Image (cartoon, rainbow, N blue to C red):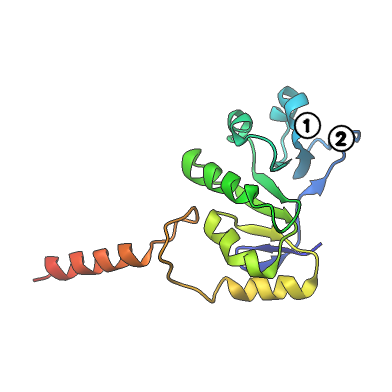
Amino acid sequence: MPLVKHGKITRDAFVHVDDAAEIPGDGPVLISAARLLADAGILSRRLGKLGVIWPNNRDVDELVPYLGRLAMVALVFPTFRDGRAYSQARLLRERHDYRGELRATGQVLRDQFVFMLRAGFDALEVKKDGDAEAFASTIKRYSVFYQPTGDGRATALHRRMQQRHSESASQ
């Protein structure tokens, strides 16, 4: 499955590990939420990067104690109509100050891509190569937004206020 990360099509470094499989001692691995919660002590001593697939029907507050150890959190869009992962992304970025990779998985559609970026996602798993190319080019399409969101970009209002401040300071 193609991965778009920071506007570029890239290879997924994380190895998906099934719940019944043994977890490799090193290297980046991606595990389920159930596995993380069941084996948290063992996983915290692993040398390699750790990522978790967090379903959209679980409270992100359960994830907070592990955020310092997680290099990646994959939030799931089970259908294109289910937007709970947007809320989870915003909570992780804005309330819990999570700075690791935030990945959208599942039904990741072209017309929702910009909204995913604005919610704080920086990586997207897509099903088609054509979608990956479209997503990679979309990130460069918009440079100014009106609404403040989880991706950290300054809004149009903030830019205007900064410009006015610097103009008044130079007078």
Q: Is residue 43 visible?
A: yes
Give the Cα separation between the discs numbered 1 and 2: 8 Å
Classify residue 165 as left or right of residue 75.
left
- Residue 44, position in %: x, y? 69, 28
Image mark for residue 19: 2
Snapshot quadrant of residue 27 = top right
**Circle 1/circle 2 CB separation < 8 Å:** yes
Mark 1 or mark 2: which comes first in sequence?
2
Judge whether 74 appears above or below 167 on screen: above
- Element on which disc 1 rests: helix
Q: Is residue 27 visible?
A: no
Residue found at the far top of this picture: 41
Please tell me how crowded label 2 is: few (under 14), some (14-19), or many (20+) other residues with Cα within 10 Å. few
Residue located at (36% from left, 67% from top): 156
Three-letter code, disc 2: Asp
- Element on which disc 2 rests: loop
Of the 4 image quadrants, the one containing the N terminus is: bottom right
Image mark for residue 34: 1
Residue found at the far front of this picture: 81
Q: Nearer the viewer, residue 79 or 76?
A: 79
Of the 4 image quadrants, the one containing the C terminus is: bottom left
- Residue 78, position in %: x, y? 76, 51
